[in-house]
């Protein structure tokens, strides 16, 4: 608890500074972390080599490696910003692409299963989606020090996002969809045969969560991919993919719908490779040998 109180003091101090100073401090710390985190850098390079083979030059891979730390720092800073900013503040820096796709669905009184990833400024993207488009229910994974959970919950719930801890979250999602509400799921983390299905990702069969497809099938709710990008870290675009409808309740339909989600995610990552969270062992479940030293 003492550590958390010290963190809150630091938070108050940082948020009293002008935004350019805060950003400069966070990105400087990210650059330092990049220089000393050799083991994590190795994982990033292993992922990039596995996914892109020889498509990227050494310099391109190093640039992506460096930006992984910067992007993580910007998301942490965004969490702090989201505890204080408003929907109006977010609307000043975020524009929506293909919004008509979701407006048409919501106008029919239906909820939406939004799927996204740890891509770009995902904290800003989630806040923009929930505060400016439609309130959301989502999942969070608690910190090892539980006192920090309230900080994260405050940052997200401020923007009309209801959160459930990962354990038991499926019931939370189901209740929301049953009442024609909308949910947000992250689909870029690894899965296993118990909770997912196999689909190609960068040319390799891997397990992906099939939760979105199962929920879509059960509640007859469309799946819509949503991702945030930026060219200058000042102005952001939240873009919506074409809706995916699960055709039937059989395993084949679940696999097909999950595959569509993963194909869209891969296309996005290939278009903006530096924006994805490359520093986790995404393929460790199926190809753990790529992470050997």
Image (cartoon, grey):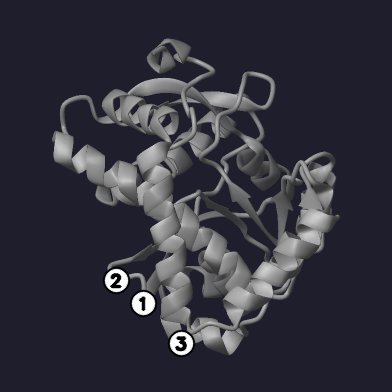
Residue of label 1? 235
Secondary element at tag 3: helix
Query: Which residue: 76% across, 41% down?
Result: 144
Secondary element at tag 1: loop
Query: Which residue: 41% across, 79% down?
Result: 20
Residue of label 3? 92
Image coordinates for residue 84, horizontal then vertical, percent: 66, 80
Q: CA distance from mark 1 to mark 2?
A: 6 Å
Q: Vertically, is 133 above or below 278?
A: below
- Label 1 packing within 10 angstroms: few (<14), some (14-19), many (20+): few
Asked if residue 109 lies left or right of residue 240, the reply is right
Asked if residue 28 lies left or right of residue 57, the reply is right
| Quadrant of the rendering where the C terminus is positioned | top left
Q: Based on the displayed image, in which of its 4 quarters is residue 93 positioned?
A: bottom left
Q: Is residue 221 visible?
A: yes
Q: How many marks?
A: 3
Q: Earlier in the sequence, mark 2 or mark 3?
A: 3
Front-lying residue, 273 or 257: 273
Residue 232 shows which numbered tag? 2
Image coordinates for residue 202, horizontal then vertical, percent: 33, 30
Dot 1 and dot 2 residues touching (CB under 8 Å) = yes
Image coordinates for residue 131, horizontal then vertical, percent: 63, 77
Image coordinates for residue 125, horizontal then vertical, percent: 51, 66
Q: Is residue 180 visible?
A: no
Secondary element at tag 2: loop
Asked if residue 134 lies left or right of residue 51, the reply is right
Q: Vertically, is 261 above or below 227?
A: above
Dot 1 and dot 3 residues touching (CB under 8 Å) = no
- The mark closer to the camera, 2 or 3, is 2
Q: CA distance from mark 1 to mark 3?
A: 8 Å
């Amino acid at each position: 608890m003492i550590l958390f109180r010290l963190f809150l003091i630091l938070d108050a101090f940082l948020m009293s500074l002008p935004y350019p100073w805060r950003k400069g401090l966070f990105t400087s710390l990210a650059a330092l972390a990049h220089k000393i985190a050799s083991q994590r850098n190795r994982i990033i390079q292993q992922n990039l080599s596995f996914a892109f083979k020889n498509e990227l030059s050494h310099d391109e891979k190093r640039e992506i490696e460096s930006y992984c730390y910067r992007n993580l720092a910007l998301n942490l800073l965004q969490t702090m910003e989201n505890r204080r900013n408003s929907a109006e503040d977010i609307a000043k820096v975020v524009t929506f692409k293909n919004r008509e796709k979701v407006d048409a669905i919501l106008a029919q009184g239906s909820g939406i299963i939004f799927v996204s990833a740890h891509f770009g400024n995902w904290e800003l993207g989630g806040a923009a989606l929930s505060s400016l488009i439609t309130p959301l229910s989502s999942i969070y994974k608690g910190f090892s020090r539980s006192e920090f959970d309230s900080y994260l919950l405050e940052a997200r719930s401020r923007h009309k996002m209801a959160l459930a801890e990962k354990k038991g979250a499926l019931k939370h999602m189901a209740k929301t969809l049953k009442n024609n509400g909308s949910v947000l799921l992250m689909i870029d983390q690894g899965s296993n045969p118990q909770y997912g299905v196999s689909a190609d990702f960068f040319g390799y069969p891997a397990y992906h969560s099939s939760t979105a497809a199962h929920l879509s099938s059960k509640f007859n709710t469309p799946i819509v991919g949503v991702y945030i990008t930026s060219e200058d870290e000042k102005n952001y675009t939240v873009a919506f993919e074409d809706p995916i409808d699960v055709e039937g309740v059989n395993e084949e339909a679940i696999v097909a719908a999950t595959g569509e989600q993963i194909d869209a995610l891969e296309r996005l990552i290939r278009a903006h490779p530096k924006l994805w969270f490359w520093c986790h062992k995404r393929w460790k479940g199926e190809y753990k040998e790529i992470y050997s030293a």
